[in-house]
Amino acid sequence: MMIKETSLRRDPDLRGELAFLARGCDFVLPSRFKKRLKSFQQTQIQNKPEKKPGTPLPPPATSPSSPRPLSPVPHVNNVVNAPLSINIPRFYFPEGLPDTCSNHEQTLSRIETAFMDIEDQKADIYEMGKIAKVCGCPLYWKAPMFRAAGGEKTGFVAAQSFIAMWRKLLNNHHDDASKFICLLAKPNCSSLEQEDFIPLLQDVVDTHPGLTFLKDAPEFHSRYITTVIQRIFYTVNRSWSGKITSMEIRKSNFLQTLALLEEEEDINQITDYFSYEHFYVIYCKFWELDTDHDLYISQADLSRYNDQASSNRIIERIFSGAVTRGKTIQKEGRMSYADFVWFLISEEDKRNPTSIEYWFRCMDVDGDGILSMYELEYFYEEQCERMETMGIEPLPFHDLLCQMLDLVKPATDGKITLRDLKRCRMAHIFYDTFFNLEKYLDHEQRDPFAVQKDVESDGPEPSDWDRFAAEEYETLVAEESAQAQFQEGFEDYETDEPASPSEFGNKGNKILSASLPEKCGKLHSVDEE
């Protein structure tokens, strides 16, 4: 049935009334426009004398084609309420909530005074630390501030150029996260990529008192910086996009941890992101697997980690690109050191939110966001084969599945989602059951009440990764100390001149700084990707 076209586009009166209807009336189907419009006009005419009894009625329209609407604009506004959005205050501030009480001119005046104390009013990277404190920023913001003001090109920052840059920053960015992104990111970018952190971390390596020993091993600067960058993105970049936004910075503890570097001289006390001990453990683990020392490991190399504790099927999923970026793994079947950092932290701390997402991506073979019973059986089959080889009778899959469903308690029967695993707080047991035989057997022999006690404890206990790194570091230090004592004893036997206690102490303090070059040989700095 064909509907006759109306003259809506040709009738200006009708269009005017429809505009008023659209502001305050419910949505009406096109076929009922004219009927609703006629009723609306009659109501307006009837209500005019009642609302304003002392004023005469306006003259009636002479013809329907008059250019003036039948209902004048002021009367329509009296009937139709103004949109409520006008009264809703602004609640979204992507650059931070503006502080109306702050006095930017006073801050800029203090900056100008600080530059006067510097020769020629030109600050280098070291003197920029004083300017950062005057600006109210942590000390290690000095490198981003130096680069943002153009200091990298000339080697210094003039007072006028810095004040102009900082004035613009204060006017457009109102919290620390937004300012940090603006200082560190590329021009016209609102997020941070991995290479954006290199100048900041190089400054930490060059100036932090807890890393002075690394000056004698510059070939390891890039390895330490790579490790810290990967740890930052592992914790902060919750969207897995490879770009850190100001919102992710606000939700993380990165800026607070960066500020601690100024107060804590022992960088190993800052276990988040910057710990040299953690870097030492990660790099030594990688070096043991990288037999040809080309800074890449193959699938066979990774399978040797922890005496082949991880199943081959889960390693195949890692090398399929489920949790890695770039084309190196997919084309050449090799994993870089940066990707190994993600693997090691995820393997040793399966309670971490990023780790839970990491292994979920690996087990979700079809990528539908659900771990089906078929996918669970696929990974458990290899576990059964390995247990049979060891002479251990495996639990039938049906019985194991009942245990896992009772453990996770998924919202939908037979479908385990990422939300289910995060909510149950037992994801580490779930994952180890399907692809880490050694840890699975440890869980089976452990007291179930002790496991439940660990889940219920909400105290500020160290994470599984912190415990693993501390234990491995002690083991590595013991090995290096024993080797150093053996070498010293051999040298003393040859020279027959015993070393003084002070000399022995100095040598012991240098063990860790020298152990990487001794263990790894001469290594050239190679940047991944």
Image (spheres, rainbow, N blue to C red):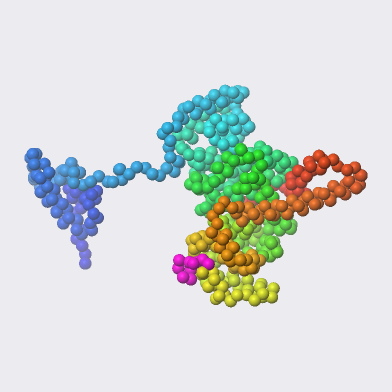
Residue at left offset 34%, top offset 42% = 89
Indicate whether 297 appears above or below 227.
below
**Residue 383 shown left or right of residue 353 in the figure:** right
| Magenta stretch bounds | 407-416
Residue 368 position within the rendered picture, expressed as x and y whole percent measured from the top left = 49, 65
Q: Going 48% across and 27% down the picture, which residue do you hit?
A: 106
| Res 438 quadrant in image | bottom right
Is residue 362 rendered to the left or right of residue 65? right
Q: Residue at x 68, y 58 (%)?
A: 297
Decide if residue 341 is in sight here: no
Q: Would residue 302 be visible to someone looking at this image? A: yes
Magenta stretch, overall SS: loop
Membership of 456 in magenta stretch: no
Is residue 21 left or right of 243 when viewed as pictured?
Answer: left
Please identify the quadrant where the N terminus is shown.
bottom left
Residue shown at the point (55%, 42%) measured from the top left: 256
For the residue pair 521 and 441, the one nearer the viewer reads as 441
The image shows residue 305, relative to residue 116, as above or below, that is below
**Rendered location of residue 527, percent (x, y):** 65, 48
**Residue 208 x, y percent position in the rendering:** 66, 38
